[in-house]
Image (cartoon, helix red, strand yellow):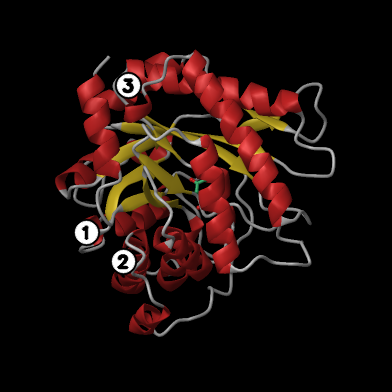
């Protein structure tokens, strides 16, 4: 195992003021997002879009790594350079989604377990050869009155542990992503209870499977009210509950916490990250972002599948990355949004994330 390089990669991914772009939507998910804007989804249009993001001028000031999907990591840019090489050359670490999706968990109606362990060692080795230096595996946990079941939490935690061990064996930093979903009418208190239980179970599994904590990153949900909850917690309450939960359940040896956005409005996701970083309580880890929708929505809408909008799409992406970079220092201010004169979320706002 390459301890030193794992630690160095993990640290580089959470370098000061930088975070990760999650651009690893499956073909099915990106197609739904494109179709909501009437953009045709072909191998070429998906490549053009993702090349637009990773080649956005100045992106590497705020973006340390990009998570790709299997199709993307094998693609070449318009000048014939493989996309992972384009990233590496511009100082952005290539990463790869390696789970094969959340599937129905037998014996637990309404719950999912993430699959993809079979053959994972060989896939990781191939991805390493293509330039990937980190990986992602997403588990999904749903809240209802009776869920999650202990079985769902432990099955997903076990799989995350086995994935993380294989990644570290193959020299890739595992991003461990246990996502407690926002969907539902639950309160922020209920989200905190479930997130606490999930994080504790996940770190127990990581311990059992001898994971080097210094060579991994955690990608959790924020502690937030359910989308259909009648009482939506304030930005300050979300920040406090999130930091409290993380301080109680995430070991300090983990170098960084990179949040998912989970369907939050893009500006709200930035405001939450900023408020967390502004809190005075000690934070033993870097606290940053690994957003998908909250980094991409404005860029996708601006680009709209049209060559003449490529530059504007890149500017929209750069802008969101810059705002989130500032939020890593707790230095984001709403006035920064005036740069692009857009204060509301893009109209198409896609809520789903099914991979
Ligand atoms: P969102 O930020 O859109 O939730 O995506 C992050 C991600 O990578 C989920 O797996």
**Residue depicted at x 32% and y 66%:** 326
Q: Which of marks 2 and 3 is in front?
A: 2
Q: Residue 61 carries which label?
A: 1
Q: In which quarter of the image is residue 93?
A: top left
The quadrant of the image that shows the C terminus is top right
Within-10-Å neighbours for mark 3: few <14, some 14–19, many 20+: few
Residue 316 x, y percent position in the rendering: 36, 71
Q: Is residue 36 visible?
A: no
Q: How much space separates mark 2 and mark 3, taking CA atoms?
A: 33 Å
Residue sitting at x 29%, y 21%: 171
Residue 336 position, x and y percent, is 35, 79
Q: Which of 204 and 148 is in front in this view?
A: 204
Check whether the beta carbons of the residues at disc 2 and disc 3 lie within 8 A of each other.
Answer: no
Residue 1 is situated, as x and y percent measured from the top left of the image, at: 27, 14
What residue is at 22 percent from the left and 33 percent from the top?
8
Figure quadrant of residue 252: top left
- Pick whichever, 276 or 123, lies toward us: 276
> Mark 3 = which residue?
126
Whether residue 211 sits left or right of residue 329 in the image: it is right
Q: Which residue is drawn at 35% across and 68% down?
A: 323
* Callouts 3 and 1 close, C-beta under 8 Å: no
| Proximity of marks 1 and 2: CB atoms separated by less than 8 Å | yes
């Amino acid at each position: 195992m390459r301890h030193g390089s794992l630690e160095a990669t993990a640290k580089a991914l959470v370098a000061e003021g930088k975070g990760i772009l999650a651009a690893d939507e499956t073909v099915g998910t990106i197609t739904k997002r494109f179709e909501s804007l009437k953009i045709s989804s072909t191998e070429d249009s998906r490549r053009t879009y993702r090349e637009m993001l990773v080649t956005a001028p100045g992106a590497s000031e705020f973006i340390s790594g990009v998570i790709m999907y299997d199709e993307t990591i094998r693609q070449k840019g318009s000048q014939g350079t493989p996309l992972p090489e384009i990233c590496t050359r511009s100082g952005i670490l290539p990463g790869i989604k390696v789970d094969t999706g959340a599937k129905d968990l037998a014996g637990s109606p309404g719950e999912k377990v993430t699959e993809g362990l079979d053959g994972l060692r060989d896939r990781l080795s191939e991805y390493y050869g293509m330039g990937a230096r980190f990986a992602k595996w997403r588990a999904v946990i749903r809240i209802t009155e009776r869920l999650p079941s202990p079985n769902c939490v432990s099955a997903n935690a076990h799989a995350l542990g086995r994935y993380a061990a294989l990644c570290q064996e193959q020299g890739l930093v595992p991003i461990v992503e246990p996502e407690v979903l926002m969907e539902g009418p639950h309160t922020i208190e209920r989200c905190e209870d479930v997130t606490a239980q999930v994080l504790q179970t996940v770190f127990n599994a990581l311990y059992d499977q001898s994971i080097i904590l210094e060579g991994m990153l955690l990608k959790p949900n924020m502690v937030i009210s359910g989308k259909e909850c009648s009482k939506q917690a304030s930005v300050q309450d979300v920040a406090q509950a999130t930091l409290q939960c993380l301080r109680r359940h995430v070991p300090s040896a983990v170098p960084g916490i990179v949040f998912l956005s989970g369907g939050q409005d893009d500006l709200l996701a930035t405001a939450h990250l900023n408020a967390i970083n502004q809190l005075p309580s000690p934070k033993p880890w870097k606290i940053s972002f690994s957003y998908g929708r909250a980094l991409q929505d404005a860029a996708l809408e601006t680009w709209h599948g049209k060559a003449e909008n490529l530059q504007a799409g890149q500017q929209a992406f750069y802008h969101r990355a810059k705002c989130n970079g500032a939020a890593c220092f707790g230095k984001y201010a709403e006035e920064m949004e005036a740069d692009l004169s857009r204060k509301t979320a893009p109209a198409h706002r896609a809520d789903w994330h099914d991979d």
